[in-house]
Image (spheres, rainbow, N blue to C red):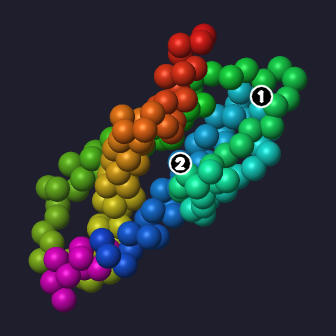
Amino acid sequence: MTNWHYLLLHLTLGYPIYQLLGTIKHELAHAVAFKLSGFGIQEFRILPFRNNDGTFFWGCVTPEIKDGARDNVHIYYAPYYVDFVLIVTGLLFGFCLRQHIVLSEFTALEVNGLITAVMLTIVSPIVDILYNLYKYWRWNRGDFAQAHAFSLTH
């Protein structure tokens, strides 16, 4: 198989796995931000679902209000901080390796490892950011809408 075949396999068969891992990363970032802000976690969902009004969600974290908990805009932006770190890390890794890479000399396992690294550190975070920006722009929903509403009231 050529490298393009491996890439096509990752995009078609591997994408659901990358989406699930991306959802775990996204919701975990919210959960950590809630905990750091003094909240508990009432619900942590990483599988896609529809709520009572039919709205689709990839996952969600529901905080448990505790005494001393302080709501802040960073709770809503936490996944995008993680996305930024992943993108920068992936790009730096790529720039450091590009001097030493000759793809034609790589084994199938090495090619698959590189594709996985690019998908997890660059593609998945960019898709996460763009999808959530689109939700904000199109329906005024999601993390950016919540952060915007929070900034208007505080």
Q: Which residue is mark 1?
A: 38
- Depth check: give the residue in front, 23 or 132: 132
Looking at the rendering, the stretch of residues picked out in magenta corresponds to: 1-10
Q: Residues within 10 Å of mark 1 (few under 14, many from 20)?
A: some
Q: Residue at x 38, y 47 (%)?
A: 131
Magenta highlight: main SS: helix
Res. 33 in view: yes
Q: Amino acid at mark 1?
A: Gly
- Depth check: give the residue in front, 90 or 136: 136
Q: Which residue occupies the extreme bottom position in the image? A: 1
Can you say whether 102 is above or below 58 in the image? Answer: below
| Distance (Cα) linking label 2 and label 1 | 19 Å
Image quadrant in which the N terminus is located: bottom left
Based on the picture, tell me whether residue 56 belongs to the magenta stretch: no
Can you say whether 88 is above or below 5 in the image? Answer: above
Name the side, left or right, on which 92 lies relative to 153.
left
Name the side, left or right, on which 52 lies relative to 131.
right
Q: Position of residue 34 (x, y in %)?
A: 69, 34
Name the element at disc 1: loop
Res. 89 in view: no
Based on the picture, tell me whether residue 3 belongs to the magenta stretch: yes
Q: Residue at x 75, y 50 (%)?
A: 43
Q: Which residue is mark 2?
A: 26
Q: Which mark is residue 68?
A: none
Q: Position of residue 75 (x, y in %)?
A: 60, 31
Q: Residue at x 52, y 26 (%)?
A: 147
